[in-house]
Amino acid sequence: MATETVAAPRSAQTQTTHRQGAAKMALSNKQYSLAQIGAFTANGDTGRLKDAIDRALDQGLTVNEIQAAMVQLYAYAGFPRSLNALSALSERVQARRAQGLKAEQGRSARPLPEHADLLALGTQTQTELVGQAVDLSALSPDIDRYLKTHLFGDVFANDLLNWQEREIITIAALSSMQGVDGQLNSHINVSKKHGISDEQIAEITRISKPEMSQFPAGGENTAYARYFAGKSYLNMLSTDQVVVGNVTFEPGTRNNWHIHHAAKGGGQMLLVTAGCGYYQEWGKPAQELKAGDIVHIPAGVKHWHGAAPTEWFQHLAIEVPGENTRSEWLEPVSDADYGKLK
């Protein structure tokens, strides 16, 4: 709908390149691979992560560079996701080497100076990266110290990846997680300070959306966001003759109760193309929807539709022609009612 032990930020090598099934993109192949690794590690999509690992190694990323990305991700997605990703990497590297395929180990990171002051180093790195001093001790002195000494003083000291690449990884990961919009927006602002463009950011945030059907998901559905609980994406497939929009719902996302009004004709049809979701009319039980289902919604019927709590969902929304048509948006579907669904 950065210090002596941290590589200074290097310019993004933003080549425009063709990727399979995609139009021209803003990220370099390396950046795109790192973004995929960030997204699929964070959302636990091991199948797509293994494919991304293979593409990354084919394109010349080293095992050590990929490891560095996955280690960084523990700070954002947690140890379980990071460890699962590292296990997937180990599995793919062993399999590729057994088949004689490319899996270059690459150089090791430059070691920290002996007896390095990680708190001082991390504080300097964090300040330079963000553009100002950051103090989270009011939330917790421990978390402030952990971030400075470990994430910025230790993990970011690994010079196999530059700051732009680390921000790309972080944005991709946060884009794949729910409830972290504040942190995501903060990292988007930081990335812009270090040369990441709006076009690159848009490409990064699209990666987390699964390829659900032959219909592209489109951009975030900001125009109607106030009528949705959760995040959705909209791609208008047709605005001539019959209006058709491809609507993609993140897990748990649903639109408000609403009514399609018309003096004559009107209403809407939903053609489900992928995922699992629900449709409900006022006063009736919700019905589960899966790919291939068709819903006919007459004009004047109060209803809602959206994704299942843990599933992505996609449908084509087709406006039935009519006279004096309009949509009336009503109250949100309550969490209590939605929580009763399977």
Image: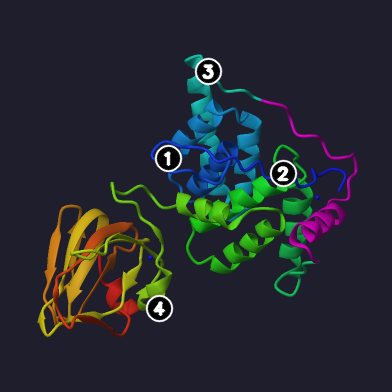
Report the residue marked by disc 2: 162
Residue in the foreground of this view, choosing between 155 and 259: 259
Within 10 angstroms of label 3, few (less than 14), some, or many (20 or more) residues? few
Name the amino acid type tagged 4: Arg
Q: Is residue 4 left or right of residue 169?
A: right
> Is residue 83 among what the camera can see?
no
Residue in the foreground of this view, choosing between 28 and 46: 28
Determine the secondary structure under disc 2.
loop
Q: Earlier in the sequence, mark 2 or mark 4?
A: 2
Residue 89 pos. (x, y %)? 53, 32
Q: Nearer the viewer, mark 2 or mark 1?
A: 2
Q: Which residues are magenta?
A: 106-132
Q: Which numbered marker is on residue 97?
A: 3
Q: Nearer the viewer, mark 3 or mark 4?
A: 4
Label 3 – label 4 distance at C-alpha: 51 Å
Residue 33 pos. (x, y %)? 54, 39
Q: Is 264 part of what is drawn in magenta?
A: no
Residue 270 pos. (x, y %)? 18, 64
Q: Earlier in the sequence, mark 4 or mark 1?
A: 1
Label 4 – label 1 distance at C-alpha: 32 Å
Report the residue marked by disc 1: 48
Report the residue marked by disc 4: 226
Q: Earlier in the sequence, mark 2 or mark 1?
A: 1
Q: Determine the residue positioned at 51% across, 57% down.
A: 175
